[in-house]
Image (cartoon, coloured by chain):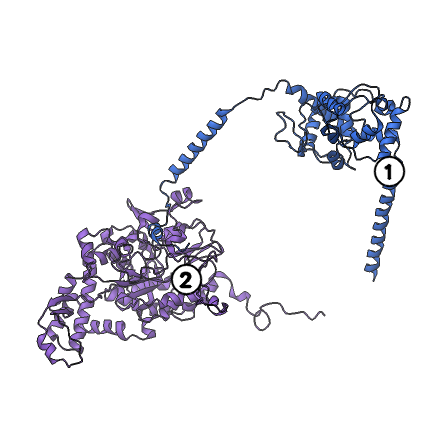
Amino acid sequence: MDIRSQISMVFHLDKCIGCHTCSVACKNIWTDRKGAEYMWWNNVETKPGTGYPTKWEDQGIYHGGWEKNGDGISLRGAGKRKGLLNIFHNPSLPVIDDYYEPFTYKYLDLIESAAGDDQPTARPVSMITGKPIDIKMGPNWDDDLSGTPDYARNDPNLKKLSAAEQEAMFQLERMAFFYLPRICNHCLNPACVASCPSGAIYKRGEDGVVLINQNVCRAWRMCVTACPYKKSYYNWHTGKSEKCILCYPRIEAGYAPACMHSCVGRIRYLGVILYDADRIHEVASASEGELINRHMDILVDPFDPTVIASAKKNGIADSTIQAAQNSPTYKFVKEWGLALPLHAEFRTLPMLFYVPPLLPVMATVKEVRNRKQTEKLGPISKVWDNDWLYDTSTEEIWGTIDQARFPLKYLANMFSAGDESKIKERLKKLMAVRIYRRWKTVGDITEKKAMDALREVGYTPEIADNVYYLTSLAKFDDRFVIPAAHREHAIEMLEFTGDKKGSTGFGFKEDTMKRGL
Amino acid sequence: MNNWGFANQKTIAAICVVSWGLIGSNWALAQDSGKELFQQRCAACHTVGEGRRVGPDLVGVNDRRSASWLLKFITASQSVIKSGDPTAIGLFKEYQIVMPDQSLSGEQIKVILDYIKEPGGGQEASAVTATAPEATDQEIAKGQDLFQGKIRFSGGGPSCISCHNVKNEAVFGGGILAKELTTVYSRVGEQGLRAILTNPPFPVMKAAFDGKPILDDETHALVGFLKLADKENAFHQPREYGWIMFGSGCVGVIALLSFYSFVGRRRKKYSVNQEIYDRQIRSE
């Protein structure tokens, strides 16, 4: 047993409103500079859709992630042999047009143009060449465009769905979409780290944040293709690759990462999860059906005395163990079994988990007699002259999950390596909490029905209350349980602090002028 | 203050050296005699009474041509040829070489012609030292190195290869700025070569070697090398490849391109959005 600590994330997709505030916060802090204009370390995608960069999930194009290879695993497009063969010309690199050509507008033209007959316009200019361009694409170009032939219907997750299932998804009455915010997953088995020929990428020992050393990076760009989530980006100006750093300077100071801090829907949770590093290889090489279960097994119980003992032996601080015990992510992922990793089949063991979306509300359209209701309406009311009702009520407890607008298969392709039962289990839990709360607040559902629902998913009313609290009421310190960074331990690993004792203080950062005696 | 004074002294010294050099050169010009001028400017190609070299023997030239014709021809031979003068055209046809234009004043030319006119004049100047011994293999190798610039001229002059070429197995890719020198030995002869190397008569070459003379042993080595190159040239039969060269080049290019496209056959060649971009309307 080799217990290590990892800062993990949970994104609650039911709560995401797709406002892109997280993306803007991240951009303003980290990627608003030359060479990084096209990068979105945090981005929000509409699903079904092709995402950013386009079709990033299709590893037939980008050859990212791991593939099972006999008993073990090997990188799909990199590694020792393939990496060396392609080192001078990586064959699967995304080009700028796969992302988009970043642009701005000549806003000054609006105020500085000479007076004339025409209204001045702000022409778009490329942020790479500085010349006027036709905008061809943006980082969220397919935002809210479910059903479009170019975007939604090209979603790589639809590949395993039958033609009839796909067609059913995009019928006008059933059309729906949800948002998928994405940052670096800070994986336990990161393909980017394994692919780097320079050894520039590393996973920080103290909190598992995956970082690229900008002094060691030699621009081979193997990480750009190897990361199956396309979350490593090449900076064309500095000639180095960059990625999400999980705002580690903020985390070390006790602040939440900028994307999480700014989240309007409060969908993001951050906390420590302890895991057993000895079993990473075994878990990453598990068969596809076993991947999710094994991934959950490797995340260990922070209350288990043997785990605590092993963690202490590895130098994990008491405060970190305590943070793991209070971790909201551990609750969502393990205790309540609500969250799932994105694309577990890439075998990188991502540590960003998603609570799958129960929304869009799975309603039905049925024919009713509206006349009596209409008669009660006042003269200024809008009167519907047809007899259709958009019915969101739940006659059967689980009925709407089985008749979901999206085939469960679609969500399963994203969150559970194709296993529909795991998605269904999580959606049922979400639904059970919702039925329970409806009984409590609205009261049009009987207590028996609510309790039956909870019992069927294995929840007690207490758990349901906790889920409800952390989902809907949680305060800042409940959503982000950030352990002390213990930089003092980290610095002691690098240098002997006694050397500095007695030699720092006022005027010592740079040598002061000598008096010339 | 000391430093300033030191700089001042140095400046004065420099001015003295430079002005002394200038005075000296003027003094040297004033000393031009017919003999010296002939040796510097003419002896490389011409003799007086010793037979033809690169150009004709100049014995009795004052009687054969009028003084005005000689003045014109010496300062600008090509313009005389172009003007259709039958004598000049005849000379060009016979010697197959244009006489380089000499930057001499009318006064200097007169001095030279007077010198040739003197009884026995010019013979002394054009008499070349007794034929030098045949160059050894070692010297030829040195000459080759000098030609190619592997050894620099001790006088500091530019290497031959920067302007000249010799078709020889040993020399690869010489200059094309000046005459090709493979058969220069048979064209000019040993004495002519020596004279040219000692006192270059061609304006550009003269300027290039001005104040950077080629030493005697270097001249000897170079002549030896050029003689060998001339001799070997007779046995060199440059092969004519013609269309085979072009054809094999084409085949080679196709073979290489197909090899590379085979190696890169699974490369990602287009943006995944290309189809969408192609359909978009552009403003230009």
Q: Which chain is purple?
A: A
Dividing the image into 4 quarters, which one contains the N terminus of chain A? Answer: bottom left
In the rendered structure, the residue with mark 2 lies on which chain?
A: A
The x, y position of residue A213, in whole percent, is 46, 57
Quarter residue A4 falls in: bottom left
The x, y position of residue A82, in whole percent, is 38, 43
Residue B230, above or below A445: above
The residue shown at (50%, 68%) is A114
Graded by Cα atoms within 10 Å as few (under 14), some (14 to 19) or many (20 or more), the crowding at tag 1 reads few
Horizontal arrangement in the rendering, residue B146 relative to residue A229 (left or right): right
Please name whichever residue, B192 or A445, is drawn nearer the observer in this view of the structure. Answer: B192
In the rendered structure, the residue with mark 1 lies on which chain?
A: B
Residue B149, above or below B24: above
**In this orientation, does residue A193 appear?**
no
Residue B29: assigned label: 1
Q: Which chain is blue?
A: B
- Assess whether mark 2 and mark 1 are in contact (beta carbons under 8 angstroms): no
Horizontal arrangement in the rendering, residue B75 relative to residue A61 (left or right): right
